[in-house]
Amino acid sequence: MEKHDKPGTPSASQDKLDALDPFRQGPGQALTTNQGTPISDNQNSLRAGIRGPSLLEDFILREKITHFDHERIPERVVHARGEGAHGFFQVYRCMSDLTSADFLQNPEDRTPVFVRFSTVAGSRGSTDTARDVRGFAVKFYTRAGNFDLVGNNIPVFFVQDAMKFPDLVHAVKPEPHNEIPQAASAHDTFWDFASLTTETTHMLMWVMSDRALPRSHRMMEGFGVHTFRLVNAEGHSRLVKFHWKPVLGIHGLAWDEAQKISGKDPDFHRRDLWEAIERGDYPEWELGIQVIEEDQADKFGFDLLDATKIVPEELVPVQRIGRLTLNRNPDNFFAETEQVAFHPGHIVPGIDFTNDPLLQGRLFSYTDTQLSRLGGPNFHEIPISRSICPFHNHQRDGMHRMTINTGRVNYDRNSLGAGLPAELPPEQGGFASVAETMESPKLRGRSPSFADHFSQANLFWRSQTAVEQDHIVAAFAFELGKVETVAIRERMVANLAQVDSGLAERVARELGLPAPTGITVCAWPGSPSPALSMVGSGDGSALTRSVAILTADGVDGEQVAAMRSALNSAGAQCKLLAARLGDVASADGTALAVDATFAAMPSVMFDAVFVPGGHSTCIGALRANGDAVHYLREAYKHCKPIAVAADGVGLLEEAALAPVPHQPAEPGVLVAAPGDAIDGLAHDFIAAIGKHRFWSRAGLASIAA
């Protein structure tokens, strides 16, 4: 009987196979396809010319992406954690000068849409508030077919070529040997990949900023990421970048706050979106476009086909051309949000692709993914993904076919079916690709115009306010502090030195590393871009903000009613909190219903906190309640607006946050003395809520909250 090898030891037969392997290289092997074909270039897809389109014959790319697309069934490989809503889009004016796209013609038309927001790295059961990119995918159900604008809340991407996408996702996902950590990039494999793939640097700056910690889906931007084309009826093509601008402004969470929300309410963003729509606070965005003439594109100093680059708004302003409104929640999460099939290849006449090598790979990948995830080629017949316009072709049968086709003809061309369905010429509305001159030769490679990996990262860094830069440093320090391999930390800090020497020095200091020397900064040649900062965005209103009102028996009911009335009139939402559920008795004996307890809805769930005055028993009870004291300290640490009326200042004193005599209060901490009218405090409080955060507060590091 043959003796079996012990588990964990190389087999003799394997040794013999290894000896026959002509590509074995010491302790490792040469990179090959699954059929054993050695791969000479695993960084670039095969294309027609150095800036030309990717080629279908690229068997290495197809094998790599196909295997990646089918790794997880049926959960999405990326963007698994998501939530969606129905709504409509209206264009502001006829855009026929730029595009023949049907839904961009008539301002009276309301084009139905379905939008799905998502995190990228985590599984379906992960938390909403992880530091991550957010997917922002919009399906337009137009009369000329479905158009899917499949983007993110960050305008650039980690890699330039779809060939690298599986490597990126493998690196950022939980490490394969122990499936740790979930929905987090703070581990060795991700930063190993990032430190060796310098094209990720610009995206890393965005992900380490507060952009990766949105306060709400309703308060984050969206971007098409890639460069597309708009084509008018005359066939004239222009390059375009798509933007979604939130009406409420761009606002984020504090990192400490985001981590706590993950434990307190991992469905924070999902719940926020659902509840806003249910109460009629319909989320809205404006669609913006940056339009670039072909001859203008060559003058920027960077390549518009490079998905790791933005077009700064100071170079090409964003034209706001329409409004997206979400006004209906799904009836069934699985049937709609989970089954919806987005695809960047779903375009309509008037919109076309470019040769962006990341986009080119996505055009293949999304179809391949849906075949696996949704069970076959008929995923377009699932109700949520089905077009509202009729479709006619000769595609038949397959798994999950729902259409019952009649007749004997299932081919083109035919005479037995009167030649139908027939092609529609472009001049009558049929889709036609923009004619382009292709380069030669066929090759693998990266255009030299893609070589700059650092100057736009420098632009992003220089465009942030001082406090936003502090947050970026803290994020890099946190993430790289989780990395166990010192060499990876050192490589990453050296990369940051090419972005900004001060940034690299600060991160190095936090990691206990020497500051890099002798590295040249790749500086952006122009001025900073104010549009890249989140600070000061929005209209300054308190619309849809949530406010906690801390109470106990003996609270001043008139102050509570007056503040609640003022906040509700300003469009904010209020909840009355106490140590227990039920009612609290106001100072005049009126019963006030409690909405939640301090423990069940902590300060991280709210945008602002109000402490009314009242009988000494009320303030005494709050001062003696550790949860109430912690509430204020935590809200203060997270730089949220705090309003205190009359005797309520006693809770500020207990929290060691009371203003020093003869000194102004810290920014965003508003105190009304006994006898002051509540109207004035409410007015100032609403204005403070509209500013969102007061990042300039002093002494935050000393607050134990």
Image (cartoon, grey):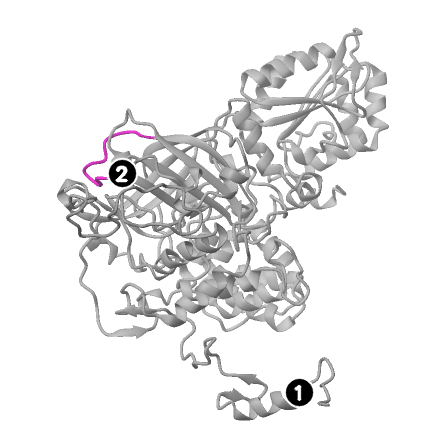
Side of 1 relative to 381 (left or right): right
**Residue at 49% across / 88% down in the picture?**
23
State whether the magenta stretch is mostly helix, strand or loop.
loop
Please tell me how crowded label 2 is: few (under 14), some (14-19), or many (20+) other residues with Cα within 10 Å.
many
> Compared to 684, does 471 lie above or below?
below
Side of 533 relative to 354 (left or right): right
The CA distance from mark 2 to mark 1 is 61 Å
- Front-most of residues 108 and 645: 108
Three-letter amino acid code at disc 2? Ala
Circle 2 is placed at which residue position? 144
Quarter in which the N terminus is drawn: bottom right
Q: Which mark is residue 11?
A: 1
- Residue interval drawn in magenta: 90-100
Nearest-to-viewer mark from 2 and 1: 1
Three-letter amino acid code at disc 1? Ser
Residue 370's spot in the image, x, y percent? 45, 52
**Residue at 22% across / 53% down in the picture?**
296
